Amino acid sequence: MNAAIVEEAAVRVLVVGDANVDLVLRGDVLPRFGQAEQLLDSADLTLGSSAGIVAHGLARLGIPTALAATVGDDEFGRLTRGWLSEAGVDVSSLGVHPTLPTGLSVILSAPTDRSILTLLGSIPTLTGDAVLAAV
């Protein structure tokens, strides 16, 4: 990509959508109720959400990118904002909901399948007005 073209605009791509964290738990186990402890192979806390991941990837490619989404006023929201900022995403349109938590997905990943449990939290609170303000 021509660097002169990229420098013409402060933001070339506005990604609109969700921003949350993923807790990925890996192991060859199936969840069991009854307080049966099971051991995992690994666990990772990462940037999740389709929009957040796309914005992060575009920024890492050097494309000026902003994200319009909403996180909670909590540690997961601060982590999400930090991961995006470190990648070069413009987070000035990343809203903070004062009472709802940042969205969270827990991914149970086995060798042949996975299950996803999601807490929407602040994800659905992004408004059209917030998106228009980001343009």
Image (cartoon, rainbow, N blue to C red):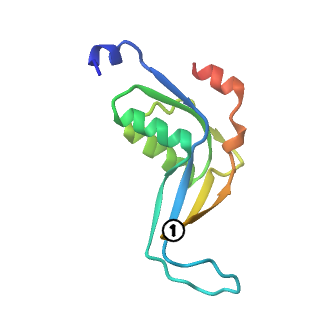
Mark 1 packing: few (<14 Cα in 10 Å), some, or many (20+)? Answer: few
Question: What residue type is disc 1 on?
Answer: Thr
At a point 66% along the width and 57% down the height, the residue shown is 118
Q: Where residue 72 sits: x, y (%)?
A: 63, 47
Name the foreground residue: 24 vs 70. 24
Q: Residue furthest front?
A: 112
Q: How many marks?
A: 1
Q: Where residue 111 sits: x, y (%)?
A: 48, 70
Residue where numbered disc 1 is placed:
112
At a point 50% along the width and 33% down the height, the residue shown is 91
Name the foreground residue: 123 vs 111. 111
Q: Quadrant of the N terminus?
A: top left
At a point 52% along the width and 41% down the height, the residue shown is 52
Name the foreground residue: 107 vs 104. 107
Q: Where residue 70 sits: x, y (%)?
A: 63, 39
Q: Residue 94: in sight, yes or no? A: no
